[in-house]
Image: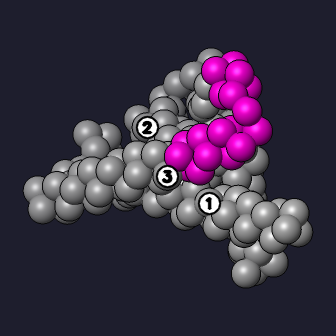
Amino acid sequence: MVNFVSRVSSVLGCAEKFLIGIMAVLAIILIVGETVLRYLAPAYLPDWGAEVTVYLVGWATMLSLPSLVAQDNHVRADLVVDQFSRRMRKILEIVVLLVGAGFCAVIFVAGIQMVQFGLRFGEISDSSLRFPMWIFYLAVPFGYGFSMLRYVMLLIKRLTESRASSVSAD
């Protein structure tokens, strides 16, 4: 089970990094292109460049959340946790993973409602691009859904490690 979770985590990590990299490169190209056009040919400056950059950065940010969870770089109070015994730290770590997964689940559901709102009312951007906003909103349930999956995967890993260490201790 742990090997399967590790393989899935590795595949997800590679996909996340690839997509984040592509989005970052595209955002940089757009920003540089707009800057050059602003000075050399302002008449050709599109009205949607900054908007698309915001969409790319927003999606990249949401895609980076699961990687932070997987690398154990999520927000937590190490200073407080380190004051407890080893056994209590393991229990607190499980509680933190459960709370993290629960928080992600709540934001995931709220994100789905946001996407449904955008779809229901046909919300589109103000630029000439007329971009459907539900696609941008989709980044929230996508990022938090995968973060929730990463928390569950970490939870499975920690529980199987705890079980294996308690069996070997006996």
Q: How is the image coloured?
A: one colour
- Nearer the camera: disc 2 or disc 3: 3
Q: Tell me the quadrant of the picture where the C terminus can be found.
A: bottom right
Q: Across the whole image, how many numbered discs are drawn on residues? A: 3
Q: Residue placed at 72% from the left, 73% from the top?
A: 5
**Left or right for 166, reference 135:** right
Q: Which is nearer the N-term, disc 3 or disc 1?
A: 3
Task: For label 3, count other residues whose C-alpha is less than 10 Å away and answer few (under 14), some (14-19) or many (20+).
Answer: some
Q: Mark 2 is on which residue type?
A: Glu
**Residue 157 appears in view:** no
Kind of element beneath mark 3: helix
Q: Tell me the quadrant of the picture where the N terminus can be found.
A: bottom right
Placement of 112 over or under 38, stated as above or below: below
Residue assigned mark 1: 155
Q: Which is nearer the N-term, disc 1 or disc 2?
A: 2
Give coordinates of residue 32: x percent, y percent: 69, 30
**Left or right for 139, reference 166:** left
Tag 3–tag 1 contact (CB < 8 Å)? yes
- Range shown magenta: 78-97
Residue assigned mark 2: 51
**Left or right for 133, reference 62:** left
Give coordinates of residue 18: x percent, y percent: 75, 59
Placement of 114 over or under 155, stated as above or below: above
Q: Which is nearer the N-term, disc 2 or disc 3?
A: 2
Give coordinates of residue 38: x percent, y percent: 57, 22
Mark linked to residue 98: 3
- Nearer the camera: disc 1 or disc 2: 1
Q: Mark 1 is on which residue type?
A: Leu
